[in-house]
Each structure stands twice: as structure tokens, then as C-alpha cells.
Image (spheres, coloured by chain):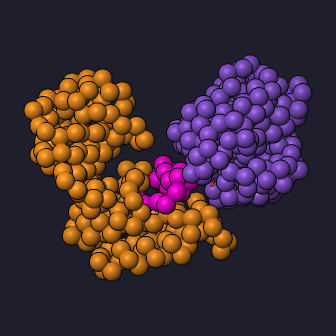
Amino acid sequence: MGCDARAVAAAVRAAAAVVTAHRDELVRLDQAIGDGDHGENLKRGFGFVVQALDESTPDTPGAVLKLVATTLISKVGGAAGPLYGTAFLRAATAVGDATELTPELVAKALRAALEGVVARGKAEVGDKTMVDALAPAAEVGSLAAAATAAERGAESTIPLVARKGRASYLGERAIGHQDPGARSTALVLRAFAEAAS
Amino acid sequence: MTVGIVIVSHSAALAAGVVELAGQMAPDVVIIAAGGDGDGGLGTDFEAVSEAVERAQSGDGVVLLYDLGSAKMVADLAVEMLGDPESAAVVDAPLVEGAVAGAVAAQAGADLDGVLSAAASALADQTEVDSETAGVTLLLTNETGLHARPASQVVQAIAGLDAQVTVRFGDRSADGRSVLALMGLGAAAGDRITVGATGPDAREALTRLENLVRGEFR
Ligand SMILES: Nc1ncnc2c1ncn2[C@@H]1O[C@H](COP(=O)(O)OP(=O)(O)O)[C@@H](O)[C@H]1O
Ligand SMILES: [Mg+2]
């Protein structure tokens, strides 16, 4: 299976579809411990991404990822914009000018994405954020394994108190709810894994 | 011209209110509100923040203040993506007091570091209780940043003073008397650290550290 710019764009479209299908679920999760906009933020943002890809698909995987990044940064208000945007931006830089993504490049991109999110938001594992999903995903070899690790990581946020983001204002009241950003991260990685298989 | 100021808030009304309040004491300072999601709702708008920074830039630098955590992320990104990221800086400060203190300093002709320091120490100055509390933001212009030798010079500089000194970099902080903790901050050349001090000798501690850093640890 060749993973060229076209394939990466297809994976991004698949992620956009999944995020859109799960909009209400993400909104509910964010209503419980935030302001309820996460599902709408991501749906809107990925909607603009698909629109940008319709207008022109860049010719390297890195350029596709960069287009996703700049679109999310400029179109998504809320924490998810700078965080997802930085993740895609660092992933784009990590894969450079390669015309096809190898498994090694995908692993490198995941690690770079994690580093970007941590640099931007300063969260650690256990702070009940998307880092809890992305960190275990960045440690494994394949996209499929990354998606599974992210799903487990997202579920691991349920019993936690949040130490970053809006939910951190809730203290103990955040316990018992899954973090919306961790959930959306797992959804996006699962969509990527399925598109690549 | 003066250093410009940008207020990044989730709320357009809040940003506008802070601009109004700070502007009253600083008629010549360009202070620009970047509030709301751009669609009339609550949120932050990266493009609006980037534009505001451009408009506030007169060549002397721009200081950005923010309300909640995700506004800080947007502000940081906007600065990183500037052609010259050194020409603007985000300050961790209470929004209202920081904006007023920063604007007053800019009006008085302070440079970028001066406005940053004024904003960063705004709250400290107002909450002096029974001991002095103060803070200053400093740009590391020496070659090695807070590496081993500079870190130990910091410790030596405040030895014998009756002051609790904390050095902050990003969201990490270190005791000013621990060489290891100071090195652990990882502050490098070109980074900005914030030094806070409390206790009877707080001012003296800050003056010494300010001289040390500005003198490039020589
Ligand atoms: N500092 C941070 N570091 C990492 N992730 C964060 C941080 N702050 C918030 N998040 C993530 O962002 C999610 C919320 O996104 P969203 O609702 O779109 O933004 P907002 O919180 O501004 O409304 C959280 O569930 C969390 O996973
Ligand atoms: Mg939210």
C-alpha cells in the first residue's frame, strides 16, 4: 500500500467524517467538564480542512499535513485549534519532503505531534487531556496499535482530576467523565489507522 | 512610538473593556482588543490575534496579555509565527492589572522588557502585605542561558539576603538558591525568565539579579 499525498488526504477526509459523526458525543463530553464546544469546534475545523483539500490537494504528505495544521489553527477557536494545529504542524515537519510515508515516518510524525502538543499546552500524562491519548500512541510501532493505545489512554482519563484546560477549574467534579480531547484524539487516530489498512 | 499591547480574550466585550481601562492611563499607547471567536461568539480567533499584533507593532515591540489558558496557546502561536518572533512576547500576568501596569510603563517609554516586567509584577505590587513582593522579567542575552556557571552566580548573588527568590521559565519554577533547580529550568539564550521575590530584601535581590542578567553574567 503506497501512502502518498493522495492517501494522506483520504485519511484526513476519513477523520473529518468520523469527527462529524461523533460531534454530539464530543459535545456531551465537553458539556460535562468544559464548555460543550469541542465537538462543534472539531467538526467546523475539519469541515474547512475538507474544503481546502477540495480546492487543491498538495503533492506531498507533509504538505497535506501542513494544510490541515494551518486550517485548524486559523479556523478553530478554543484549545483544540492550537493543540491539533501544532500536532499536525510538527508532524508535517517530521515527514519533510517525503513523497510516500513509511511506517518509520508515521511513527516519527506521531512522536513529533506529541512533542508539539506538550510544548504548546504543557500537560503531562495523567493531567486528563489529549496527551493521555497521544502519549501512549506515540510509543507504539503502527497506526493500528497507536489507535488502540489512544483508545485505552482516553478511557484512562475517566477517573482523573484535570490539571490542564477548562476542566481543571472543576476539581473533583471532573472525576467520572472521559476527557473530550483525549476521546477525539483516539477517534482521529482510529480513522487514520482504518484508512491506512 | 511606544511598545504596543494586545489583549487576547475569549470575550470581545472583556477585551474591549480591558482596552478601555488601560487606555485611559496611556493615551499614546496602541492597545488592541482581540476578543471573541470572530463570529460574535465566545472563543479565540488566531487570525484576529495575528492582525492585532501587526497593528500594535510600531517597531518597538508588542506585549500580549490573555485571559484563559487556551487564549495563551493562541497568543503563543501568533508570536511564534511572526517573521521576527523576538518582536513580541506573551506575558503571564493578571489580565486587568497587567494590562494597566504594562500600558502605563509603555506610555512612560519603557522598552519591551520593561513593559513585560511591569505587567508581570502588577499583581505582586498590589498585594504587598507585610513583606515586600516584587517581580521582574529578564531576557537572557548571555551565550549559555541559565547554564551551570550563570546558575551558580544567581545563587551567589542573593546569598545572605533575607528573601525568598523564585525563578520562573514557562510554567516551571525553581528556587533561586538551588543551582540544580535553576539549571533544570532549561532556560537558554534568548529566553525570558521571570524572577519573583518576597521578604524584606526582595527589592535588593531583584536589583542584584537584574544587574547580573543585564550584565550578561560577567
Ligand atoms: N493545556 C492543555 N494541554 C493539552 N490538552 C489540552 C490543554 N488544554 C485543553 N486541552 C484539551 O483540549 C480539550 C478541550 O478542547 P476544546 O473544547 O475544543 O477547547 P476549550 O477548552 O477552549 O473549550 C480538552 O478536553 C483537552 O483534551
Ligand atoms: Mg470546550
* Number of numbered tags placed on the structure image: 0
Residue B144 falls inside the magenta stretch: no
Residue B171, position as x, y percentages in the image: 43, 41
Q: Is residue A36 left or right of residue B135?
A: right
Quadrant of the image containing the C terminus of chain A: top right
Quarter of the image for residue B95 reads: bottom left
Quarter of the image for residue B88 reads: bottom left
Q: Is residue B182 above or below residue A46?
A: above
Q: Nearer the viewer, residue A189 or A4?
A: A189
Q: Which residues are magenta?
A: B64-82
Residue B147, position as x, y percentages in the image: 28, 26
Dominant SS of magenta comes to helix
Q: Nearer the viewer, residue A16 or B171?
A: B171
Residue occupying image coordinates x 72% and y 37%: A158
Residue occupying image coordinates x 40% and y 37%: B172
Q: Nearer the viewer, residue B142 or B26?
A: B26
Q: Is residue B92 above or below residue A6?
A: below
- Chain drawn purple in the picture: A
Q: Is residue A71 visible?
A: no
Instruction: Give the color of chain B as drawn.
Output: orange
Residue A141, position as x, y percentages in the image: 74, 19
Q: Nearer the viewer, residue A161 or B88?
A: A161
Residue occupying image coordinates x 18% and y 45%: B199
